[in-house]
Image (spheres, rainbow, N blue to C red):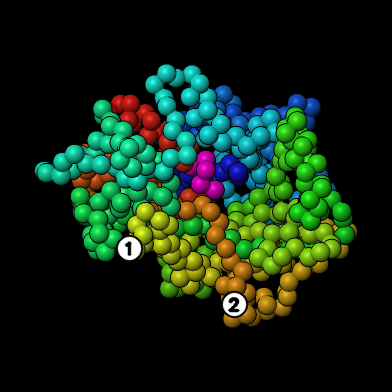
Amino acid sequence: MVYSHGYAGEYDKFAASVKDDGFSWAKLLPYMRKNEAFQVPTGVNITGKFDPNAHGFNGVIGTEIHSNNAWLFQPILDAAAQTGGTFTYNQDYNSGSMLGIGWQQTAIKAGQRSSAAAAYINKQSHERKNLDVLVNTLVNRVVANSTQPTPKITAVEFPGGNNGTMQVHARKEVIVSTGTMNTPPLLMRSGLGPEDQLKAAGIQTVLAIPHVGQNLIDHIMIGLPYQVNTTETDDEITRNATLRQTLLDQWRKDHTGRYAEVSDSHIKFSRIPDSASIFSTVADPTASKEGPHYEQLINNNWVFNDPLPETGYFMTMLHFLSSPISHGSIRLNPSDPNGMALIDPGYLNEDFDVFVLRAALRESIQYMRAPAWQKFNATPHFDVTVADNDDTLTEFIRNYVGGGVHCVGTARMVSHDSTDGVVGPDFKVKGVDGLRVVDASIIPYIPSGHTMAVVYALAERASDVIKGA
């Protein structure tokens, strides 16, 4: 739900890699603004908390600055000033420059999540006569009516009808928007993918595309919980079923209350030092010195792999790896190609990723020792001595790391003249007619921001590219 675009340099890197300036920061910025409807709250002064020049105000996705958990606001910013270093204040991380700590922006409008389903599909389904939405339907495959000289996709097949399957035929093109995890299996079930996997699953090859399902990248996540002496955290919501129902009833009535907001108010993006020893063996994966290596969020509740303790109140320093270099993959299950795919996230396969997380966690431990937290008796609810040694901290990370659910890259976009990848800058699957992919799977490098806002901007551009074809 965090609304963050990333920094300008990584879009320019994207544009250079696919040899299309349309993916540069300058060219995508109008689409970012077109998508967004930033909500300036009534009666609340947010001057200095965001940059109006970095936002759109008339789009379809509502965004806002978080305003709950007021007890956290002052200690978060005071501790940042006391810690110094990378904790410099950033008025707006969506300005194209992300580094520093600032107020978090979320895709919320009038107490409800402002999603693609609500803002695009639901709205369009009521306003357009040429849009039908088939719910509770899982597509089996896309269908080619010929394979020579170039495969041409003309239909979509899904369960139903007297014969067990039905097909919807396209007059022009089929557009796949099934996401990073589902697009590769769909393509492979359609005979488009690595030939060895298709053969093992008993699927006839329509076109061998070796890179389908490769290049899976995610923002790895890990939290550090701290016990505090305030009762204003959200932990009681987790423990108390009656309270949860009361809050849900309130939200259903008028979209107000605790369920109308999130549990974090500030966000920070940072780099490890240029002099870090890891750079003697690994190249910096960021596009410029403006690119973050890691992200920190301060959550008003327990966010940890261990269960929430039965008593006590907690806040969590949550960390995301912003520029990971570890890659995973998605493969068809040869014994059940229509079932769940085989996912290898590849987390922490590279030493760089472990190095960055160690640095991030150690920095957070220092930050939580700032005088501003003493009033709340912020006490680590984990063995803080694990940070004294690289080996023990690495073991801790490997035991407690999880997925950030920001996956990209499994149908990677490349330039028209590249011999690898899956789609070209026109969103067309390479070597195939009548088929495009428009979702997070096409993004070649994981954005430093959370991927939602990035996908919206790319989809808006894709819409113009398709309409102009």
Foreground of the two, 376 or 270: 376
Q: Nearer the viewer, mark 1 or mark 2?
A: 1
Give the image location of residue 113, x and y in percent: 63, 37
User: Quick one: SS at disc 2?
Assistant: helix
Mark count: 2
Magenta: main secondary structure equals: helix
Q: Is residue 292 left or right of residue 88?
A: left
For the view shown, which residue lies furthest in the front direction? 162
Gap in angstroms between the C-alphas marked 1 and 2? 34 Å
Name the image quarter holding the C terminus: top left
Report the amino acid beneath label 2. Glu
* Badge 1 or badge 2: first in the primary sequence: 1
Percent position of residue 153, x then y: 24, 39
Task: Check disc 1 and give the amino acid type.
Answer: Pro
Classify 10 Å Cα crowding around label 2: few (below 14), some (14-19), many (20 and above): few
Which quadrant of the structure image shows residue 22?
Answer: top left
Do the numbered discs 1 and 2 sit on residues whose CB atoms are within 8 Å? no
Q: Residue 381 vs residue 204: left or right?
A: right
